[in-house]
Amino acid sequence: MIYTVTAVIFLHIISLPIVFSVRVDADSDKGFGTVSVKLFFITVFKRSLDVDALKNSLFGGSQADDEKRSNDDATDGKRSKLKAYAFASAKRALLRLRVRELTVNVRIGTGNAAASAMTVGALRVAFNRACTVLGYVGDAEIEPDYGAEMIRILFSGIFSLCIADIIYAACGALRDIAGEKTKRSVASTT
């Protein structure tokens, strides 16, 4: 009897949804930005953003930034198995994420009307693709500002994920990595 009760309690705990919310608020005109993450509506992470650095990276950074990116790309190919496993697990968990609410308001300007239009189009396509992957039907207000270099972002979303989803994603990633290893060993022997 005690085993049945323990099993029922365990199954209830792993099927309980973990609800978290993310809010990003950035404005280059006012020079502020914040990112906050809440777990069960309790703030667990809050950080201010350097909006000027974000603006410089989007609208053209320095040559030193480009050199740093090329060095990061060179070391990226040397990822360890643990990093590959963590990335594969996160990717699988992201596909199991449930979107409960999503609000996106973006106004972006590059100083060039054509570039602003292309950027807004690309952002709208990226948002729609992300909604398709997450299984969410929604719309975003993504508008261009043709006359100025500016970024204004207001993103807020409520998401949920069960512990069972995390376990499923971790096991699937482990299976993929183990299957990849056996494929390599079979290919090397032939």
Image (cartoon, rainbow, N blue to C red):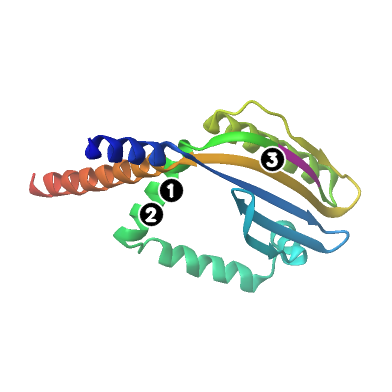
Tag 1: residue type? Ala
Q: Residue at x 84, y 49 (%)?
A: 112
Image x and y of residue 178, in percent: 21, 47
> Callout 1: helix, strand or loop?
helix
The mark found on residue 23 in the picture is: none
Q: Residue at x 54, y 33 (%)?
A: 134
In primary-sequence order, the first of circles 3 and 1 is 1
How many C-alpha atoms fall within 10 Å of the one at disc 1: few (<14), some, or many (≥20)? some
The quarter holding residue 44 reads bottom right
Q: Nearer the viewer, mark 3 or mark 1?
A: 1
Q: Viewer-proximal residue, 5 or 171?
A: 5
Measured along the vertical axis of the image, is residue 178 above or below residue 121? Answer: below
Tag 3: residue type? Leu
Q: Name the residue furthest left.
A: 189
> Which image quarter is the N terminus in?
top left
Q: Viewer-proximal residue, 56 or 177?
A: 177
Query: Is 7 displayed left or right of 165 in the figure?
Result: left
The quarter holding residue 176 reads top left
Image x and y of residue 99, in percent: 59, 35
Q: Residue at x 63, y 74 (%)?
A: 64
Measured along the vertical axis of the image, is residue 135 above or below residue 168? Answer: above
Tag 2: residue type? Ala
Give the residue number, with chain letter if any, for mark 2: 86
Task: Tell me which segment is drawn in magenta.
Answer: 103-107
Give the residue number, with chain letter if any, for mark 1: 90
> Callout 2: helix, strand or loop?
helix
Q: Nearer the viewer, mark 2 or mark 3?
A: 2
Give the residue number, with chain letter if any, for mark 3: 123
How many C-alpha atoms fall within 10 Å of the one at disc 3: few (<14), some, or many (≥20)? some
In primary-sequence order, the first of circles 2 and 3 is 2
